[in-house]
Every structure is written in structure tokens, then in C-alpha cells.
Image (cartoon, rainbow, N blue to C red):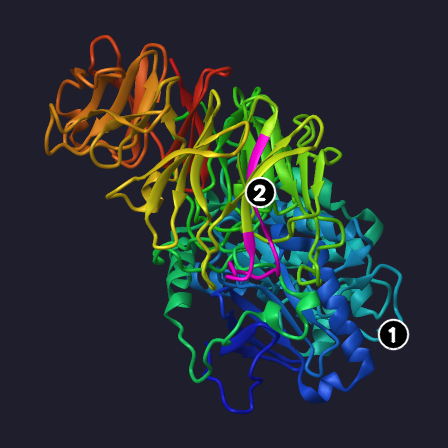
């Protein structure tokens, strides 16, 4: 149980202020802490007496290193650390989920399907650790956190490199007796096979509620571990030979983690589908509870950590690792992070269930889709939202720890990055994917005086790797998070970048420009200044942008939170015309724009068309349909489609604005006005509640519906599918 702070507790750990104590042990204390920008983390510290021991400090540093090795996919992501401080500390993501021992206490012995999925995922974690020649040495139920996306391994306090015994007294048994390997119990070398033995013991506990060698005095336990037979009497029959092989006293006869994973589980389905309802409910409770914990006595830091004297070692910016939590108000920083977390779904996937964001539950029922992939939120949060984009035969989207490329037709994952790309710094013209790249030497050094160049590169669609940069612009600071790629067209990239000091937020002292770069030569074609943002603002300059002919059409958010339509000449950057987009909140129009060769079409209220050449209004739906409200529009082949509130899909002539037809029947009364419809050849697709409806363009009636959690939709014309993103899933539906 969390306990209040006292005045004896530290005031801060770098940018993180402790809120409550989560627990305390022989080596140190664990705190729930938050940064001034709202990031919630778990901070592990050393007791003052322990910190004075050089050997203990070395073990603490190695613990941080091991946690970094296993990463956020299988463990608690390390977001910051200072192992050289007077009171050393490690800050990790705060994982939402109970320890395995508490899960078993709550739900009882876990079902076989749960044990198998749990074991396969933990094999992936150990395989990752062992690949770097590190062993955990203390696997036990309390060191496994069960999240909705998979288990996470924590507490690497006695992990060490294989063959390294300088930090452990020869002949000493180090670990937890009930889950030790025989060789560890005898003070001998503990290898990767020892971790497999401990994993099997942990799975026996999960299946039966007790350790394989019972409990009791330490000496008795160590003897039974070395010489006794494990008690597998209540283990499901199909698991007995699998776990029995792992519990062989001879480490050379135990299976590898990869072979054990294959014996346990084929990786199908989402991890949450394998969890008992009681455990899922506990995860949901914890996701809500963490936001009800308020500081007992300490206020948030008055200024960003990047402004301190240690700015050269500034932590990752505020948006990184922010995820929107289940039941949490919009804009609140969430508390979990994970790698790409793809379910095997309907397509082939070689990996077992993996860990991912631990702050909300997955839907337990599969979507009614051609294929689906379970995904995490993007690493820099959900405001602005990450949009899926169609590029060649792929769907590209930023999720979890970076950018991923998915085959649009089959749903197979072609590649997935761990480069923590920022989703508003990526764009495509449908054939080429370009992005801003972290400058060399900037990791952990964002506050360097003078900054770093802005680096731009294309992405190899076969591998996901950034190619050699086509531009490195020294007149901008390339590490400022709010730098933004607007769009790319006709071999030109359009972007926004700032010059000046790095900070988590905009600074009034920074200068900003919108500019164009020739992708083939790297030459900057033009740059036009933008008004400075006030201090402590974090809203990006642009909500949406696209090129139509020689027009760069953009929706720009002003400093007072309003939206302005700005059209520039793509050849010079000069503003051709600008006018306010009245009556809309910026978040409602942060969507792909609807244009044809002549007009810009606007919804999110009344529906209207503005001429691209001069901004003059061509038509307004209020003329013929006063008092009606519309969602964002889509346009195709001279017809504008939009959802009318309370009615459904309506089609308008793009030139005159006259209504051509309305959706028939009452199915459109609950149609969603927050998303634009997707238009195929014969059908339009519109979201209603938790379904995507297909409306026949000839009969104007709904003909089919598909279950979906998506709230963002895009047509992939080449693959003939509608891509949906939302509710922790990326999925494909028909496009006909």
C-alpha cells in the first residue's frame, strides 16, 4: 500500500517530485513520482547507508543497465537515472498491473491458457536479456508485473553478466530460495539455464498457487531445491512434462527460452484475452487509482528540468512516454509505455505475446475486420493524434516505441522501429515517406548550447530505416520537439522549425519559420517567419496541411487558440490569402483536409466551400439546409460527402453545394460527426457508435456494418481496404 511522505524523504530526483512511497526494502525505497510536466514514474532509490558502499553502488548501476537492456517491451522502461548522485536513483515508467503473486492471491490458481501465455511472453523477456549475456538471477512472482498487454520483468538488483562473479562472494547463495536454481542454491555459476529453472518454478506457482519446492526455513528450502523433486501434483497435465524438463537438476538438459516458448504458446490472440476477469478488473482499478493519488506535501517543480544547471543531460521531452489513460481526463499524462504490441490477429506474426502500454484494457473480443493488429499509443502521446498513412503497399503509423510499416493487404508487420519517432514529424505523398531524424549526439544532450542541426531523411520502405539525410539545416535547432513536418508533394517537403534554446515547451525567445526543402538536392527553397509562441505553450503551429497545385493549404492554430486558414504559394512561401475558421475547436479539425482542384471544403459545423485561388466563399450549406450540423467532409469525383448530425450521410454537388441525396432509413441517426467518411467506388464508410457502416452509393442505404474500435479512418486505394486506428487496434476493412 502507498504510504505518505515524511520530511525525511528526498525533495526531488532530478525533475521528479515524489508523491507517495510505494515500498521499502533492504537496499532502498520506491516512490511514485511526477515531473512538473506531468509524467508519472516509479523512482527506485538507495538508502543512505547502502549508498556509501561502493559495491552496492556498482550493483545499483548494473541494475539500471540491465533494465535498459530489457527495455520497455518486456520491462519497466527506464526514462531517467542518476546512479552517481549522493542518493542514487532510477526512474522508470509506472507499470499498471499487479505483481504475479497478488494476481494469484486475487484470482486463485491461473488457468492453463493464462500460464502458457505468461510463460511464452516471459521467455521473450529472458531471451532479450540473455542475448546480451546478462542473467536475472531473481525471478519470482513479486518481480513479474501482469499488465493487459503482457508481463513485465522488474527488479534487476542482483542481475549480472554471465561468468561475472566479482560482485558476489564465491560460494554464497544469492536470490530467493523458493525460486532459485540448484546451481544458484549451491553458490555455483548461475547461467541462462538457471533463469529457465526459475521461470518454470514461477509458472508452477502461477498454476497452483505454491512454489514447486514448498516453503519453510531457508536451509530446508535450499536442500529441496538442490536434491528434492518438484511438486507438480496440481499442475495441468499437459504442462507437467514441459515444466518438468525445465526443472531438471542438470542445467544442460533444460530447454532454451525459444524452445520453451514454442512449447508453451503459439502467440495467437491478445494477451488480455488470456487473463481471468478478476485480473483484468484489478488492472483497470489500478489504472484509475494512480490518478487519484495526490502529493502529500510536495509541490511540482517550478520550472522545467532542462533549464537547470544540468541541462546538458536533460531528460526526454515532456511528450515522450505520455499515453492517455483509461478513464483519465484528456490531456493528462498517462503512466505506461511499451514497444509495438502487435497481436497475431489474422496474419502471420513470429513473436509471442509481448508487453505494451499498461494503462488500459484491451477489447477482449476480436474485431470484425479483414485483419487487425494490437498497437500501443505513440511515444509522444495522443495530442495531436497519430494518423495512419497509406504509402505504396504499406500502412505507416507511429505507435509504441516508433514507426511501423504494415502490409495493407495482409496486416503482416514488415518492420517496426524503436527510434521513438515523433508522429508529427513524418509525412508521405503516397510514394515516399520522409521524417525528421534525431541529430547525431543529441540523445541525452538536448540542452547543448547552440543546439543541433535539423536533419531530414527519407525512410526505406523495405526496412523502415532512415536513409542518408537529404538535408541538414544548421539555421534551426533540430532537437526542439515542436518542429513539425507538414506534408510533402512533387519532391518538396514543407515543414516548420524553430531556432533557439531547447525546452519541453515553446519559448517566446525562439524564432520559428515555415519553409520548403527540395528533397532531391536538400536545398531550402524558401522560409517565411511565423509569430512567436508564448512561453509554456505546447500546441503545434499547424493542425493540417496539403498541397493543391501551387497552393500550400493549411489550418494554423493561433496563439489565442483559434483556427486560421492560410494558403501560401508553394514556390515562394508568400501568403496568398488567410481568413479565420470561426466556431471550431482546434482539435476537431486536426484531420486530413478535403480539397479538389478548385476548392477547400470545411465541416465541423456548417458545410461550406472556399475557393483556393482567393478564399472567397463558393457555397454554404446554411443557404439550403439552415441549422444543420456536419462532420468533416470528404470529396471524390465532384461530390462532397459529410455526415449530418441526426440524419446520416449526405452527398452534395462540389461546385454548387446542392444536396444530391441523403442516406435512407434511420441507421444514420447515430452516425459519428467527428470523423470524415471514407469513399470507395460503390460504398461510403461511416462510423456509428462501435461500428463502421457501409452505405451503398447507388441505393443510398446501409448494407453492412463492421465492429470496430477505430476513430480514425483512411482509404488505402492500392490495397482496396479501409484502414482504421483507435482503441489500441489498427485494422483493415473492405473498400469497395
**In the rendering, at what x and y percent does residue 202 appear?**
62, 58
Residue 271 belongs to the span the image colors magenta = no
- The relative height of residue 677 versus residue 148 in the rendered view (above or below) is above
Q: Secondary structure at mark 2?
A: loop
Q: Residue furthest bottom?
A: 7
Residue 310's quadrant in the figure? Answer: bottom right
As measured in the structure, the alpha-carbon distance from the residue carrying label 1 to the one carrying label 2 is 42 Å
Q: Which residue sits at x=48%, y=33%?
A: 388
Q: What label sits on residue 340 in the rendered view? A: 2
**Of labels 1 and 2, the one closer to you:** 2
Circle 1 residues within 10 Å: few <14, some 14–19, many ≥20:
few
Q: Is residue 236 visible?
A: no
Viewer-closest of 485 and 146: 485
Q: Is residue 378 left or right of residue 83?
A: left
Viewer-closest of 616 and 495: 616
> Magenta region: which residues?
493-511
Disc 1 designates what residue? 171
Image quadrant containing the C terminus: top left
Amino acid at each position: 500500500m502507498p504510504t505518505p511522505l515524511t520530511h525525511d524523504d528526498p525533495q526531488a530526483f532530478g525533475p521528479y517530485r515524489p508523491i507517495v512511497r510505494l515500498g521499502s526494502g533492504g537496499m532502498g525505497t520506491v516512490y511514485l513520482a511526477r515531473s512538473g510536466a506531468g509524467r508519472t514514474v516509479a523512482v527506485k532509490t538507495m538508502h543512505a547507508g547502502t549508498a556509501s558502499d561502493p559495491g552496492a553502488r556498482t550493483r545499483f548501476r548494473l541494475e539500471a543497465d540491465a533494465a535498459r537492456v530489457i527495455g520497455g517491451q518486456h520491462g519497466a522502461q527506464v526514462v531517467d537515472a542518476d546512479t552517481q548522485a549522493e542518493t542514487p536513483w532510477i526512474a522508470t515508467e509506472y507499470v499498471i498491473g499487479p505483481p504475479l503473486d497478488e494476481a494469484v492471491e486475487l484470482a486463485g490458481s491461473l488457468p492453463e491458457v493464462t500460464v502458457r501465455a505468461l510463460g511464452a511472453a516471459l521467455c521473450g523477456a529472458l531471451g532479450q536479456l540473455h542475448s546480451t549475456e546478462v542473467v536475472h538471477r531473481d525471478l519470482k512472482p513479486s518481480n513479474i508485473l501482469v499488465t493487459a498487454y503482457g508481463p513485465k520483468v522488474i527488479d534487476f538488483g542482483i542481475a549480472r553478466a554471465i561468468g561475472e562473479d566479482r560482485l558476489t562472494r564465491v560460494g554464497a547463495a544469492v536470490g530467493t530460495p523458493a525460486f532459485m536454481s540448484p546451481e544458484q542454491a549451491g553458490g555455483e555459476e548461475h547461467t541462462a539455464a538457471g533463469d529457465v529453472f526459475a521461470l518454470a518454478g514461477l509458472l508452477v506457482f502461477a498454476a497452483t498457487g505454491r512454489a514447486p519446492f514448498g516453503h519453510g526455513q531457508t536451509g530446508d528450502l535450499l536442500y529441496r531445491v538442490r536434491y528434492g523433486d518438484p511438486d507438480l501434483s496440481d499442475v495441468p497435465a499437459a504442462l507437467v512434462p514441459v515444466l518438468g524438463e525445465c526443472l531438471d537438476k542438470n542445467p544442460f538438459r533444460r530447454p532454451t527460452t525459444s524452445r520453451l516458448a514454442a512449447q508453451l504458446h503459439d502467440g495467437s490472440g491478445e494477451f488480455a484475452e488470456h487473463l481471468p476477469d478478476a485480473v483484468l478488473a484489478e488492472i483497470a482499478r489500478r489504472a484509475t487509482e494512480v490518478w487519484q493519488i495526490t502529493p502529500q506535501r510536495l509541490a511540482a517543480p517550478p520550472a522545467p528540468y532542462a533549464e537547470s544547471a544540468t541541462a546538458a543531460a536533460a531528460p526526454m521531452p515532456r511528450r515522450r512516454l505520455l499515453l492517455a489513460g483509461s478513464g483519465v481526463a484528456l490531456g493528462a499524462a498517462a503512466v505506461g509505455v511499451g514497444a509495438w504490441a502487435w497481436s497475431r490477429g489474422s496474419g502471420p506474426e513470429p513473436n509471442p505475446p509481448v508487453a505494451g502500454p499498461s494503462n488500459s484494457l484491451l477489447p477482449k473480443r476480436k474485431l470484425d475486420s479483414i485483419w487487425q493488429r494490437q498497437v500501443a499509443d505513440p511515444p509522444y502521446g495522443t495530442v495531436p493524434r497519430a494518423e495512419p498513412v497509406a504509402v505504396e503497399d504499406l500502412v505507416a503509423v507511429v505507435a509504441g516505441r516508433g514507426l511501423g510499416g504494415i502490409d495493407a493487404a495482409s496486416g503482416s508487420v514488415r518492420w517496426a522501429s524503436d527510434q521513438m519517432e515523433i508522429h508529427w514529424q513524418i509525412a508521405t505523398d503516397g510514394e515516399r515517406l520522409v521524417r525528421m531524424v534525431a541529430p547525431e549526439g543529441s540523445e541525452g544532450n538536448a540542452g547543448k548550447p547552440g543546439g543541433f542541426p535539423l536533419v531530414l531523411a527519407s525512410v526505406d520502405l523495405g526496412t523502415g530505416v532512415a536513409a542518408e539525410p537529404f538535408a541538414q539545416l544548421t539555421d534551426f535547432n533540430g532537437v526542439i520537439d515542436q518542429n513539425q513536418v507538414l506534408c510533402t508533394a512533387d519532391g518538396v517537403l514543407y515543414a516548420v522549425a524553430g531556432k533557439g534554446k531547447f525546452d519541453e515547451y515553446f519559448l517566446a525567445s525562439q524564432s520559428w519559420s515555415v519553409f520548403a526543402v527540395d528533397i532531391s538536392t536538400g536545398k531550402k527553397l524558401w522560409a517565411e517567419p511565423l509569430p512567436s509562441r508564448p512561453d509554456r505553450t505546447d500546441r503545434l503551429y499547424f493542425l493540417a496541411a496539403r498541397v493543391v497545385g501551387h497552393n500550400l493549404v493549411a489550418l494554423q492554430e493561433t496563439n489565442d487558440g483559434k483556427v486560421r486558414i492560410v494558403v501560401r504559394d508553394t514556390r515562394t512561401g508568400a501568403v496568398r490569402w488567410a481568413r479565420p475558421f470561426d466556431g471550431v475547436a482546434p482539435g476537431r479539425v486536426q484531420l486530413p483536409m478535403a480539397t479538389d482542384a478548385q476548392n477547400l471544403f470545411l465541416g465541423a459545423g456548417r458545410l461550406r466551400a472556399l475557393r483556393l485561388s482567393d478564399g472567397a466563399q463558393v457555397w454554404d450549406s446554411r443557404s439550403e439546409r439552415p441549422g444543420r450540423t456536419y462532420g468533416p467532409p470528404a470529396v471524390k469525383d465532384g461530390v462532397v460527402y459529410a455526415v449530418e448530425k441526426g440524419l446520416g450521410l449526405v452527398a452534395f454537388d462540389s461546385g454548387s453545394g446542392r444536396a444530391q441525396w441523403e442516406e435512407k432509413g434511420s441507421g444514420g441517426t447515430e452516425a459519428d460527426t467527428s470523423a470524415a467518411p471514407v469513399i470507395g467506388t460503390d460504398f461510403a464508410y461511416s462510423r456509428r457508435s462501435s461500428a463502421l457502416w457501409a452505405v451503398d452509393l447507388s441505393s443510398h442505404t446501409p448494407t453492412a456494418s463492421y465492429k470496430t474500435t477505430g476513430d480514425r479512418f483512411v482509404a488505402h486505394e492500392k490495397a482496396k481496404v479501409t484502414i482504421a486506428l483507435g482503441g489500441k487496434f489498427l485494422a483493415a476493412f473492405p473498400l469497395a
